[in-house]
Amino acid sequence: MLEPGQVVRVAAVGDLHCHKTSQGHFQPIFAAAKAESDILVLCGDLTDYGLPEEAEVLVKEMAPAAGLPTVAVLGNHDFHSDRQDEVRQILIEAGVHMLDGDAVELEGVGFAGAKGFAGGFGRGTLGAWGEPAIKAFVQEAVNEAMKLEAALARLRTARRIAVLHYAPIRATVENEPVEIFPFLGCSRLEDPLNRYPVTAVVHGHAHHGSPDGQTSGGTPVYNVSLPLIRATTPDRPYFRIIEVSLETD
């Protein structure tokens, strides 16, 4: 445990899309994370097709980061083969704190996580009106927002980070084709972040979005999708570092 007044360095990245032939591809990321941070956060789409075999490759790729506390949420790709429970269990057995409406405290910082879901932003947020399929779609977004809120409510730490795969605000999906904005995140995820203020929010999913934004309450939001990080900071192509001071207010 770090002492009050110290700074916790959180390395955050999403959208690794690890597949069966990724051996050796991600080891530099995890080696750098071990050297440069106190905690690693993985923001979903850890695998490409949601296969246990891909998760097993990823766990081997994580070997250089052995001993580094790691937090993760799943993404939509991790659900593709309907084997998400197996993927999650492989990562749990490797020591990763998997969050799905859960919270964990590490090094004096609280982490609350959920996958999130789609649905659009602001006045364009899809409402539960019309066909049963639309109502079910909207209910999924509501359920994910409720998961995030339940996780945030459990935390008692002064410093808290929300971990998502889908974006909670429009600003960090800007630069993507506007036609796909509704599938990149949902404003329903922002509501819990305003009710339970956090230090920062991290998400992935929008590979060509924008790296920075903020909630309507002023909380920083970081898009840490790996393709975006590599495009915007080619000299630091691995992850976003977020420094969290443990200084008491």
Image (cartoon, helix red, strand yellow):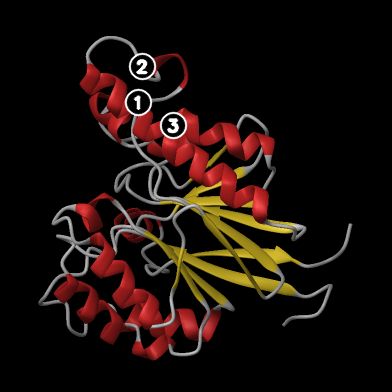
Secondary structure at numbered mark 2 = loop
Crowdedness near tag 2: few (<14), some (14–19) or many (≥20) residues, C-alpha within 10 Å: some
Q: Amino acid at mark 1?
A: Val
Q: Is residue 53 left or right of residue 99?
A: left
Q: Amino acid at mark 2?
A: Ala
In the image as oriented, which residue stretches furthest toward the top? 130
User: Are dots 3 and 1 in contact, CB under 8 Å?
Assistant: yes
What label does residue 25 carry, if any?
A: none
Quadrant (top left/top right/bottom left/bottom right) for the N terminus: bottom right
Mark 2 and 1 residues: CB-CB less than 8 Å, in contact?
yes
Q: CA distance from mark 2 to mark 1?
A: 6 Å
Tell me which residue sits at (77%, 58%) in the image: 158
Q: Is residue 188 above or below residue 210?
A: above
Q: What residue is rendered at 81% in x and 80% in y?
A: 3
Which quadrant would the C terminus be assigned to in this image? bottom right
Name of the residue lying farthest toward the right? 249
Residue for badge 1 = 138
The residue carrying pointer 3 sits among few (fewer than 14), some (14 to 19) or many (20 or more) residues within 10 Å by Cα, namely some
Q: Position of residue 139 (x, y in %)?
A: 37, 29
**Which percent across, then down, holds residue 168?**
47, 37
Residue on which the image places disc 3: 142
Q: Residues at badges 2 and 3 in contact (C-beta under 8 Å)? A: no
Q: How many other residues sit within 10 Å of disc 1, few (<14), some (14-19) or many (≥20)? A: many
**Label whose residue precedes the other's in the sequence (2 or 1):** 2
Task: Give the residue number, with chain letter if any, for mark 2.
Answer: 128
